[in-house]
Amino acid sequence: MTFKKLWQHRVWWAVIAGAILTATPAGFAHADAPGPTDYSSVIVEVTTPESLPLADDVAITIEGHDSFLSVTVARGTTVKVPGYEGEEYLKIESDCTAYENQRSMSTWYNKERYGSDFGADVVDHDAAPEWLQIASNCTLAWHDHRIHYMSPQPPVNAKPGDVIVADSIPLTIDDISVAVRVESSLVERPSLLAPLVAAAGALLLVVGVIGRTSAALQRLMVAASLVGLVIGGAQYLWAAPGTGPQLTSFALPLLATVLSGSAIVFNRTSSIQRNGVQLISSIFLALWVLRRKDVLDAALLPTSLPYWVDRAGTAAIGVIVCAAAGDALVGLWQIANANRPSPRQA
């Protein structure tokens, strides 16, 4: 197999993989992964009857700023989490295996951040629980709607710092009743200076590059894809176990990196392949930018990177992607016109 054919095979595999990833529903197999938010939830107090002590190895935390409530225990400790209607919902056995009751309304309602009625036809709190093993690491993490604000629209007349939600979540740990009191507050949104400056800088860079050889813009696309890979990888790795981080957060820029690199390989061999691959890589990276557009102005982001880096990088990539896609479309249009017979030939 020649080098050119090997790259062609890689390109087609990348295109197929990207199409599958793009078509996969965001909530497939997991509850919604933590995303950008304007709210910060904190555990205010954990109480037990008569102040009974919990084991030192019990950790109750909030993950994803306001997305998930998480409980981690040591082997030998048991946990039971009732649902919103008091039904059996989640549990951790003494051997560290964690289970979810498929007949619980809470199982399906918690699949999405703002609630879901998917699976409502199997809910039956009077029937015996139908336990499905979901983990084996002594940890549970679940969307509990009592720890966050339940609307995509901001609360009326609320100011940054205001407590928007205050509630208590009951658990049972080693047969001891536990109440976890949580408060969620509105956080001030950031300045748009970083993404605007980054977008302007990227635009100047594109203007300086676009008049040169096509390879210059393709190299810029490779660089943008690599930056997207770093940003997406930081988002994926930041998410705690059990919170369903989305594969597309880093897989789409990874595929865009492979494809934009392939466009450079095809640069000297086939203009139509080069422009076609560049267009496809631009589409994948554009979808990645669109999926995370909320990072530009949300107060809290799902990443271990400095927030301004995430916002600025996303904005710059968006500008470069638009330029690369436009350049590829113009190239394909020119090829189509060049191959069209003239009126005299017709």
Image (cartoon, rainbow, N blue to C red):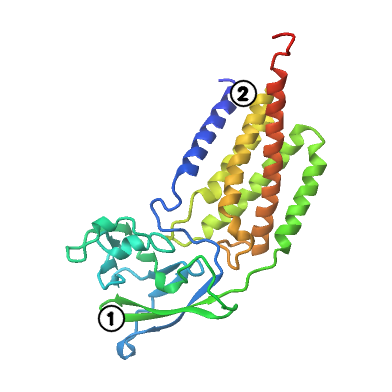
Q: Secondary structure at mark 2?
A: helix
Residue 275 drawn at (x, y percent): 67, 30
Alpha-carbon span between mark 1 and mark 2: 66 Å
Q: Is residue 172 left or right of residue 37?
A: left
N-terminal of the pair, mark 1 or mark 2, is 2
**Residue 15 on image: x %, y %:** 53, 34
Q: Residue at x 69, y 25 (%)?
A: 271
**Which residue is identified by label 1?**
176
Kind of residue indicated by mark 2? Lys
Residue closest to the far left: 127
Circle 2 residue: 4
Residue 238 visible here: yes
Mark 1, secondary structure of its residue: strand
Toward the bottom, the furthest residue is 50
Circles 1 and 2, Cβ within 8 Å, touching? The answer is: no
**Of residues 130 and 319, the one drawn nearer to the viewer in this rendering:** 319
Residue 327 vs 225, above or below: the answer is above
